Image (cartoon, grey):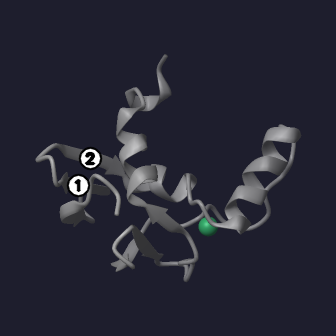
Amino acid sequence: MPDLTPLDIAVSRARGTCAITWSDRSEQVIALTDLRRLCPCSLCSDQRDKSAANPLTVISGPEPSAQLLGVERVGGYAIRFQWADGHSSGIYTYEFLHALGAAPPNGAA
Ligand SMILES: [Zn+2]
């Protein structure tokens, strides 16, 4: 079992955020666009690796959707987000999600 589990997950479509209240009572707000950009599934990781290797890679197709259709818990250790474009293969572990909150906002160092 992970040390931290979400007590509450609140998605605001209006604000485009996902707010998680953790079992230590800390609250974390993650932008849906960040969640989608950091999708941990193999497809998206591949895509990120490719564009990291070659900054000129043209990603075909429209921008990935950051619209959420739904959120579901997976096996007591992760959350799966269902995006409006049908993508839902990313399993976001609690550890992964919590680590996102530790990053400085907007990637500023
Ligand atoms: Zn993905």
Outermost residue toward the front?
A: 1
For the image shown, how many numbered marks are present on the structure?
A: 2
Q: Are marks 1 and 2 in contact (CB under 8 Å)?
A: yes
Whether residue 82 is visible to the viewer of this picture, yes or no, is yes
Is 103 on the left or on the right of 91, as rendered?
left
Q: Residue furthest bottom?
A: 86
User: Residue 32, percent across and down?
Assistant: 40, 56
Give the residue number, with chain letter if any, for mark 1.
Answer: 19
Closer to the N terminus: mark 1 or mark 2?
1
Q: Residues within 10 Å of mark 2 (few under 14, many from 20)?
A: some
Question: Image quadrant of ligand 1?
Answer: bottom right
Identify residue for label 2.
29
- Is 23 above or below relative to 101? below
- Give neighbour class at mark 1: few <14, some 14-19, many 20+ (Cα, 10 Å): some
In the image, taking residue 38 as reference, residue 75 lies left or right, namely left
Based on the displayed image, in which of its 4 quarters is residue 15 positioned?
bottom left
Q: Residue at x 55, y 83 (%)?
A: 86
Q: Quadrant of the N terminus?
A: bottom left
Whether 74 is drawn above or below 14: the answer is: below
Q: Please state which amino acid type lies under the numbered disc 1.
A: Ala
Farthest residue to the top: give it: 109
- Which residue is at the front of the view, 75 or 98? 75
Percent x, y of residue 67: 42, 69
Residue type of the residue flagged with mark 2: Val
Residue drawn at point x = 16 percent, y = 54 percent: 23
Across and down, in percent, residue 49 comes to 79, 48
* Residue nearest the viewer, comparing 46 with 56: 46
